[in-house]
Amino acid sequence: MARRIGTTRALCFAVLVFLPPAVFAAEKQPRPDRDLSNFVLQDCGSCHGMTLKGGLGPPLRPADLERLPTETVAAIIREGVPGTAMPPWKALLTPAEIDWVSQQLKSGTLLD
Ligand code: HEC
């Protein structure tokens, strides 16, 4: 009996931990650009540097991304880079948001 309760608790915990981000991703509205800019500078910036000049992750300024087409940048953001610290973002950002972020990174407009 005690074991069953333990399993139920573990399941509840798993649902609480893993479900909210999925629900959030499915229901949220597109973010206003300004909000998304802050998200990139802070969340991505925690690894790539607050001014995207690099840190744990490589720099993400236009010159650094010149060799990558916008769609490749989007694919990296979507899927992450397996085996590295770069996580996939597709559960947190919509495809449109990922495209927007990729374009901003390629053009450098987030740092204006
Ligand atoms: C936990 C740390 C971490 C976070 C947070 C993070 N990244 Fe990364 N990112 C990395 C690492 C490490 C690499 C290098 C992977 C490799 O070795 O190829 C990378 C690589 C990249 C690349 C490829 C760069 C290149 O020149 O090859 C892009 C683009 C990128 N990240 C965008 C983002 C964006 C946009 C965000 C926020 C939505 C983000 N990253 C958040 C760690 C992170």
Image (cartoon, rainbow, N blue to C red):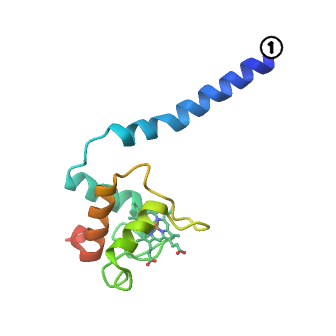
| Residue 20 image point, x, y percent | 45, 35
| Residue 46 image point, x, y percent | 44, 61
Mark 1 lies within 8 Å of ligand 1 (Cβ measured):
no
- Identified by mark 1, the residue type is Met
| Residue 6 image point, x, y percent | 73, 23
Is 111 in front, or is 2?
2
Q: Is residue 49 above or below residue 66?
A: above
Please tell me which residue is depicted at 40% across the width and 73% down the height of the picture: 72
| Residue 74 image point, x, y percent | 37, 67
Q: Is residue 3 above or below residue 24?
A: above
Q: Residue furthest top?
A: 1
Is 47 in front, or is 33?
33
State which quarter of the image contains the C terminus.
bottom left
State which quarter of the image contains the N terminus.
top right
Please tell me which residue is depicted at 42% across the width and 67% down the height of the picture: 75
Q: Is residue 43 above or below residue 29?
A: below
Please tell me which residue is depicted at 27% across the width and 55% down the height of the picture: 36
- SS of the residue under disc 1: loop
- For label 1, the residue is 1
